[in-house]
Structures are given as structure tokens and as C-alpha cells.
Image (cartoon, rainbow, N blue to C red):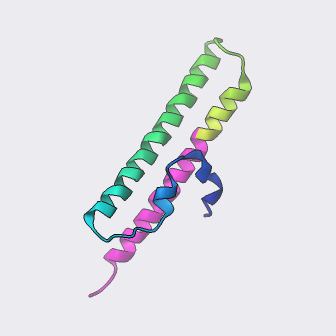
Amino acid sequence: MDISAISGLYKNTQQLTTPVKSQSANGFDSILNNAMKLVDDTNTLQNQASAQEVSFALGETDNVHDLIVAEQKANMAIQYTVAVRNQFIQGYNTIMNMQI
């Protein structure tokens, strides 16, 4: 799955896709912090979409365009997060299957 087209949703995702220059624990901490930020951003987009849905359902707004845009952003963020998670799990499984 090519996820490069949706990487514009996140401002800091370049740090996730750049190779780690150091094999130290600090490199892993950086990757972990960026992954946690990705999850937080996805959660924020989901909350914004839910707020738009509630606002539309209560009749506080009649702007369908903003509702659909918020829902699409949340959907794309979830797809991107799941793709990153799947790649991480695939890498983890590859490492665990290595024989010394």
C-alpha cells in the first residue's frame, strides 16, 4: 500500500520516513515519539469529525462540506496510522523470525 500520497496530512511525518542515522536508544525514542504524535493527531482528527457530526445533527450548522472534509481527514488519518502500524508489525515479525 503506497501511503506517500496522504503524508501531507501530518506536518511531522517526514521524521518517520527518514532513515535513522544512529542505532542508539535516542533514535528509537525519536521514532517512538513521532509514532505517538501520529496517534495523537489521528485522535484529534477523529474528535474534530465527531464534533462536526454532532453539530450537524443538532442543526447548529448546515455546512455539509465541512462535515465531509472532516470525516475524510479522519478516515485518511486512520488509514495512514494503520498502514504505519502494519509496517511496524511486519518489521517486528521479521526481526523475531531471524535465526542466529
Q: Does residue 89 show up magenta in the picture?
A: yes
Q: Position of residue 69 (x, y in %)?
A: 67, 34
Pick the quarter of the image with the C terminus.
bottom left
Q: Position of residue 84 (x, y in %)?
A: 48, 58
Q: Quadrant of residue 97?
A: bottom left
Q: Residue at x 47, y 64 (%)?
A: 87
Above-or-below relation of 93 to 40? below
Q: Quadrant of residue 90?
A: bottom left
Q: Position of residue 67 (x, y in %)?
A: 66, 28
- Who is closer to the viewer here, 91 or 9? 9
Above-or-below relation of 14 to 11? below
Q: Is residue 87 left or right of residue 56?
A: left
Q: Residue at x 48, y 40 (%)?
A: 41
Above-or-below relation of 16 to 72? below
Above-or-below relation of 70 to 18? above
Q: Does residue 4 show up magenta in the picture?
A: no
Q: Is residue 80 left or right of residue 64?
A: left
Pick the quarter of the image with the N terminus.
bottom right
Secondary structure predominantly adopted by residues drawn in magenta: helix
Region of the chain picked out in magenta, as a range = 74-100
Q: How many marks?
A: 0
Q: Residue at x 52, y 58 (%)?
A: 83
Residue ranking furthest to the bottom: 100
Q: Is residue 39 left or right of residue 49?
A: left
Residue ranking furthest to the front: 21
